[in-house]
Amino acid sequence: CLQHYNYLLTKQDQIQMQILKSHTRQPITILKDSETGQTVLNGYAVDIRYLHGSRNINWYGMFRLFDKDFRADLGFIPRVEYREYAAGTDYTFFSAKEGWWEKLKLGIDYSELKRSDGQLLNRLTAMKLTLFGTRQIHAYIKYENREEQYRNQSYKLQKLKLHHCMQPLDK
């Protein structure tokens, strides 16, 4: 069962929601290997997003929940029994006159992924600076600070990514 909603509150703001419900019958062969011992699994999933977009400022908030008994019978969802929260914003500066650059965008993002019992699985903080220029030039620098939990061990990862693309000049 699927319910999908997209509400346009204003020209710049919208709410997107998706509500999923699953009803799965376990085959006997899988049931023998299953930890639940249940023949039928009834679960649900929810995805809610608030999006704001304007010329200079964009921001979003997101909440996602997957029940422990949710199964994607006609799709692929590798993980259940978790909650995810995310938020981010960016600001775009536009060039005042024609030149080699057109706009500069600075953005930040934050997200947390937790099991339904509250245990942290993943936390991410990221910052990105992107430059858009003439002739399809774009470049960015992105910094990520991530913490992950696996088997009661905490792992920290910091990443710095540099990227540059351009369209060569015609001869």
Image (cartoon, rainbow, N blue to C red):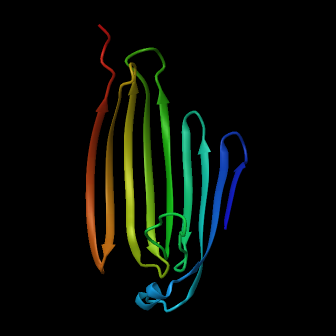
Q: How many marks?
A: 0
Residue 3 in which image quadrant: bottom right
Q: Quadrant of the C terminus?
A: top left
Q: Is residue 121 left or right of residue 25?
A: left
| Residue located 40% across and 88% down the image | 33
Q: Quadrant of the N terminus?
A: bottom right
Q: Is residue 116 above or below residue 97?
A: below
What x and y, as percent, mark residue 103?
45, 27
| Residue located 56% across and 63% down the image | 63
What x and y, as percent, mark residue 27?
51, 84
Using the image as rendered, state which of residue 83 and residue 5 is in the foreground: 5
Using the image as rendered, state which of residue 40 and residue 96 is in the foreground: 40
What x and y, as percent, mark residue 167?
33, 21
Q: Is residue 123 above or below residue 114?
A: above
Q: Is residue 164 above or below residue 69?
A: above
Residue 46 in which image quadrant: bottom right
| Residue located 31% across and 29% down the image | 165
| Residue located 67% across and 48% down the image | 14
What x and y, as percent, mark residue 113?
44, 68
Q: Is residue 164 above or below residue 60?
A: above
Residue 155 in which image quadrant: bottom left
